[in-house]
Amino acid sequence: MTSSKIEIDLRIQARRLLEKHLEGDRQSFYYLRLLSRYAHLSVDEVMKQVITIEDMQDALAVKRGYRDWLSLVETENLKTGTDTLPVPIVLERQLAEYEERGIIKFDGLISLSLIDRVREDIYLRLEKSGLWVNRKWNHQKKTSMKSALRGVNKSNIFQALITKQVLTVAKKLLLGEELIPASFPSLLFTPPYAEKWIVPSSVWHTDYPRLGKEGSPGTQMFTFLDYVKPGGGGTIQIAGSHHLLNEQGIIQSKSIKRLLSKEPFFQKLFDKNALSRDSLSFFSGRSNNTLLEAVELTGKPGDVYFCDLRLLHTLAANTSHLPRMMMTQRMLRSSIVSILPSIYSRLLDKKLKRKSLNGQ
C-alpha cells in the first residue's frame, strides 16, 4: 500500500530526531517523555537509553494525538484508501450562504466506502453488546447504548472521517483561517421508534459563549452515517441566530437564551408547549431585522452540514425506523483558541462579582 504524505514526512522527522539523539541533542527528550515507557525517567536517564527508530515514530504519533505509530499509519492509510472524491471547490455563493445563514450542507462530501466501514464497526459493537440481534433491536437487553458504543469515536476508522475534503471546506468557510479540533470527533446515536416527535423547549442552547468583536469561535460538522429523514432525530438549528447578540461583548452560553427570550420569535420557540414537526416546518421569522429559520438536519450517507458555533440548537426525538447516526466534530479558529481561557476567566470574574454585590 502506498504510504501517505504525512507518514513519509514523519518517518523522515523520526530519523532526524534519532540522529540528533545519538549525537547527544536533548531535544528528543521532549518527544520521548510522551511515551509511558519513558515518562518516569529524567532527561539524563532518557539520554542513556538505547532509543530506536520505532521509539521516535511512536513519540511523533502520540504527539499528533494517535495511540502509537501503527495507529497513525492505519488511520492515514484508511484516508488514502477511501479518499477517492475530489477536493471540493467552495463557491462564492456558498460562502455567502454560510455567512448569511450560519449553516450549509455539502452533499456526498464523504465517500460511501468509508461511511460503510464506519457503520459496520458501529453495528459490530452493538451486536457484541446484545443490543442488535439478527438485524433487529433487542429491547430486553439491559446494556446501555452509551456503554455499547464507548470508545467508538477514538477508533482509527471513525477518526478517518475527518477527511481532507471536510477540512478544506471548513477552512474555506472560515475564510482560510487555520483550524484546531476542539476534541475527538463524537458519535451522535439516537435509537429509533420514539412515540412522538417533539422539540423540547428547555434544551435550546449554544456550545460556546458569544465572543463579541472576536466573531465566530469556529464551525461544527455533522456527517451523516446513514439516512436521517424528517422526524428522524436530526439536530434542530436556528439559521441566522449567529448574527444576534454580537454587539454586547462576551456573553456566557447560559445567558444567551435568557437574553434572546425577550424577542417574540424566541418566546414562541421556548414555549413550554412542545412544537409538533408540522409547525416547525414553517417556523421562521425575524428578530432585530435578522431572518431566522428552524432547520432540521436531514440527509443521506456522506452528506455533511457545517454550522457556525454561535447557532442556537437543540436535540429532537427520533420517530423513524432507523437510528440517527452522525459524526460531529467542532473545529475552532486558531486565533480564538489562545483567548478562550481568558474569556472564561473573565466570565467567572463577572459571576463572582455579581455574587459579591448580592451578598452571597
Image (tube, rainbow, N blue to C red):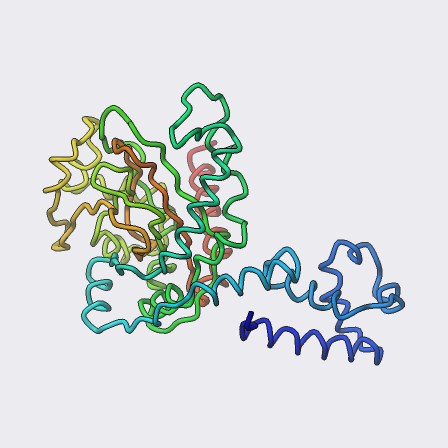
Looking at the image, residue 140 sits to the left or right of residue 268; the answer is right
Furthest residue in direction front, as rendered:
134
Q: Observer-nearest residue: 237 or 245?
A: 237
Q: Please tell me which residue is depicted at 16% across the width and 48% down the height of the picture.
A: 293
Looking at the image, residue 118 sits to the left or right of residue 65; the answer is left
Looking at the image, residue 355 sits to the left or right of residue 305; the answer is right
* Residue 95: percent from left, percent from top: 24, 68
Q: Observer-nearest residue: 289 or 303?
A: 303
In the figure, residue 172 lies in which quadrant?
bottom left
* Residue 174: percent from left, percent from top: 34, 67
* Residue 267: percent from left, percent from top: 17, 36
Q: Please tell me which residue is depicted at 54% across the width and 75% down the height of the picture.
A: 5
The N terminus lies in which quarter of the figure?
A: bottom right
Task: Count the numbered circles shown.
Answer: 0
Q: Observer-nearest residue: 144 or 269?
A: 144
Looking at the image, residue 240 sits to the left or right of residue 249; the answer is left
In the figure, residue 294 lies in which quadrant?
top left
Task: Work out whether 254 lies above or below 71.
Answer: above
Q: Observer-nearest residue: 227 or 246?
A: 227
* Residue 195: percent from left, percent from top: 25, 24
Q: Please tell me which residue is depicted at 50% across the width and 25% down the height of the picture.
A: 143
Task: Work out whether 303 lies above or below 4.
Answer: above
